[in-house]
Amino acid sequence: MKLFYANGFHGTTVDAVLEASGVPKGSFYHHFGSKEAFGLAVLDRYMSLQLELLEAASVASSAATADTLERYFDSLCQLFVDSGYRRGCLAGKFSTELAASSTPFRSQLAGSIATWHDTLAALLEQGQRRGDVRDDLSAGDLAHTVLALVQGAFVIALSSRDPAALAALRVSIRSLVELDR
């Protein structure tokens, strides 16, 4: 993942992956078959980690939904800042680089982002049933908006190296989802 974060998909060579991993070229191609297949496997692993972080923030939590989302996005933001703004959202990076030109990446990205959306929507719907998430918008619409806020904040923070967009993300998500008191 580090090489894709640093260089993008096209800027990362198989030789660089082999050197960083110490894996022989034959083993790499035997297991993955191509750089594209490797990239898709990395994307799959990345999205699995995202869902694990979200589940860890929400599992057996009696906290308000906004607090759960805040905990999740705080962990993502902290990882991003700690990396010197180099490791943001790999799905976002691959989307901008590959979705327009690669059907396999576009398809996997669409599926991965849909799963991320559905997981967020389920958490928000649970909060609506519990009475701590606004219900004048559907959980699905709220999840779409939250993901758009996250992607936008990461792009702005990446460009400016300024955590202000990430801090605004926290406030925006809370004000978006919380039931007016």
Image (spheres, helix red, strand yellow):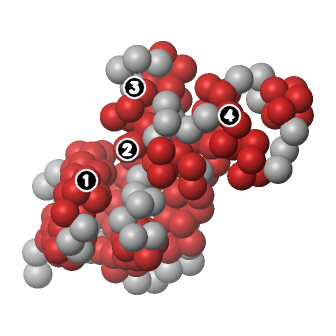
Residue 50 drawn at (x, y percent): 52, 57
- Tell me: 119 left or right of 65: right
Q: In the picture provided, is 63 more to the left or to the right than 147? A: right
> Which residue is drawn at the image coordinates 48% and 51% (left, top)?
5
Q: Nearer the viewer, residue 130 or 176?
A: 176
| Mark 2 or 4: the one toward you | 4
Q: CA distance from mark 2 to mark 3?
A: 10 Å
Give the residue pinned by disc 2.
92
Tell me which label, 4 or 1, sits earlier in the chain: 4
Task: State the CA–CA distance, disc 4 to disc 1.
Answer: 27 Å
**Residue 148 left/right relative to 114:** left
The residue under label 3 is which amino acid type?
Ala
Q: Are marks 2 and 1 in contact (CB under 8 Å)?
A: yes
- Label disc, if present, on residue 155 of the rendered structure: 1
User: In the rendered image, which residue does mark 4 sit on?
Assistant: 14
The disc, 1 or 3, on the residue closer to the chain's N-terminal end is 3
**Circle 2: residue type:** Gly
Amino acid type, label 1: Val
Among numbered discs 2 and 3, the one appearing first in the sequence: 2
Residue 45 image point, x, y percent: 64, 48
